[in-house]
Image (cartoon, rainbow, N blue to C red):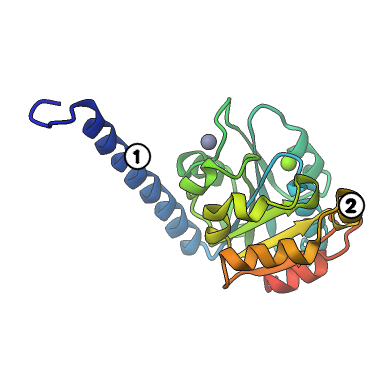
């Protein structure tokens, strides 16, 4: 850029700031839309294979009799997760990101437009499976639920501090495999709290349903 000593570098920074501003504006717009309709949205974040879909499936099974719940399922290319949850008879909107490794406010807005918000109390959003860039892309959710599983090893919390700091609640999943993985669940939970002292941590085995009621209680759902 003319007139700036560092040329392209400062141009890049300007672009990044615009993107970040636009990203949070879109998220805020989604929140306003949700609030207008009295709907709470929860963004569920975790690596591929951490058990997000199984956990959401278990939450929906318990919640659908007392809350009007819908699911937005983000996935890079497949409909596998969406089809699993659709069996429960709740509205499911699939977002195929077509290669993008995170959801953003724009994609979620398009999904919201396909739901009857007046007929809902709660929307659970399954974000794309990774813990890096979704931290930089708020989607417009009231809560962020972080899913870590013991199969990812003992250092997930300390390796993803930005995500841990942003989350309202963390799940340590697959606790039935903790011994086999030689992961200390208490230690992992303590690491999460070390990064984010405000956070509640719930241990679950989503596959068997262990801990899912405790999770819903912690979420006041
Ligand atoms: Mg999934
Ligand atoms: Zn991404």
Q: Quadrant of the N terminus?
A: top left
Q: Determine whether, in the image, residue 88 is placed left or right of residue 189.
A: right
Q: Is residue 165 above or below residue 221?
A: above
Mark before the other along the chain sequence, 2 or 1: 1
Q: Is residue 136 above or below residue 8?
A: below
The CA span between labels 2 and 1 is 41 Å
Q: Nearer the viewer, residue 192 or 203?
A: 192
Instruction: Name the residue located 79 percent from the left edge and 71 percent from the top edge.
Output: 214
Give the labeled residue for mark 1.
Answer: 19
Q: Nearer the viewer, residue 51 or 113?
A: 51
Give the labeled residue for mark 2.
Answer: 177
Q: Secondary structure at mark 1?
A: helix
Q: Which numbered disc covers residue 63?
A: none
Q: Nearer the viewer, residue 102 or 6?
A: 6
Q: Nearer the viewer, mark 2 or mark 1?
A: 2
Residue 116 pos. (x, y %): 59, 51
């Amino acid at each position: 850029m003319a007139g700036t000593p560092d040329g392209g570098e400062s141009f890049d920074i300007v672009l990044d700031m615009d993107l970040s501003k636009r990203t949070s504006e879109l998220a805020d717009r989604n929140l306003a839309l949700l609030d207008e309709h009295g709907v709470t949205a929860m963004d569920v974040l975790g690596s591929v294979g951490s058990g997000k879909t199984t956990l959401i499936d278990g939450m929906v099974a318990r919640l659908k009799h007392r809350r009007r719940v819908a699911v937005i399922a983000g996935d890079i290319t497949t409909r596998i997760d969406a089809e699993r949850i659709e069996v429960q008879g709740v509205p499911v909107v699939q977002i195929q990101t077509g290669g993008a490794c995170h959801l953003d406010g724009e994609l979620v807005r398009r999904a919201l437009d396909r739901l009857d918000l007046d007929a809902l109390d709660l929307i659970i959003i399954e974000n794309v499976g990774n813990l890096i860039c979704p931290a930089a892309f708020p989607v417009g959710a009231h809560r962020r639920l972080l899913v870590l599983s013991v199969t990812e090893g003992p250092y997930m919390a300390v390796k993803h501090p930005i995500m841990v700091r942003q989350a309202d609640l963390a799940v340590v999943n697959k606790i039935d495999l903790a011994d086999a993985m030689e992961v200390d669940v208490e230690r992992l939970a303590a690491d999460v709290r070390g990064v984010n002292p405000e956070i509640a941590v719930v241990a679950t085995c989503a596959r068997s349903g262990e801990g899912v009621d405790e999770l819903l209680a912690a979420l006041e759902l």
